[in-house]
Image: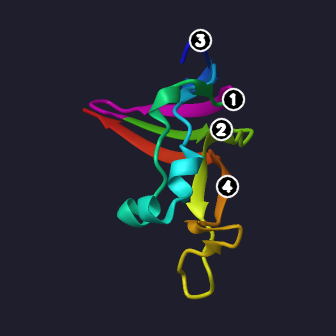
Amino acid sequence: NRQLISLVGSKELRKNWTLGAKWRLGAGTPYTPYDKDKSSLKAAWDAQNRPYLNYSLFNRQRLGAFHQLDLRIDKVYYFSKWMLGIYIDVQNVYNFKSPEQPIYTAVLDTQGKAMTDLADPQRYQMKEINADSGTILPTLGIVVEF
């Protein structure tokens, strides 16, 4: 990534409570696109059953920007010889979907076999599927220190 910004902060509250937040922003990650012409050839696809990268365009394309907000709240209990902490941590609070490299694959028939391109019998029909990742990830935790 060319740029990465992170903002982190926490606030100590009364009665051993702590509230924390982290926000991250990253510029788009570079990636190498697929060689769609080579990948659609039957001989090429059958050799590895996946698309080929276009190395003449190595890392020339970029994904969209990524950003995420994480929140955490902690409560600590102190005892004579040990400490008990509990927390709730929620990553990606607003459920941002980070763009990923599109998936390039053959179109399959009902038996799961690649379908021939009717315009060129030496090729398979291909399709591109947009991909993203990211989900809200809540975590509950316990910390014990002696």
Of the residues under marks 2 and 4, which one precedes in the sequence? 2
Of the residues under marks 3 and 4, which one precedes in the sequence? 3
Dot 2 and dot 1 residues touching (CB under 8 Å): yes
**Amino acid identity at mark 2:** Ser
The residue carrying mark 4 is: 129
Q: What number of labels is visible?
A: 4
SS for callout 2: strand
Q: Residue at x 62, y 87 (%)?
A: 110
The stretch of residues the image draws in magenta is: 64-83
Residue 64 seen from this side: yes
Dominant secondary structure of the residues highlighted in magenta in the image: strand
**Amino acid identity at mark 4:** Ile
Q: Of 60 and 41, which appears nearest the observer? A: 41
The residue carrying mark 1 is: 64
Q: Is residue 9 left or right of residue 44?
A: right
How busy is the neighbourhood of tag 4: few (under 14 within 10 Å), some, or many (20 plus)?
A: few
- Most extreme residue toward the bottom is 111
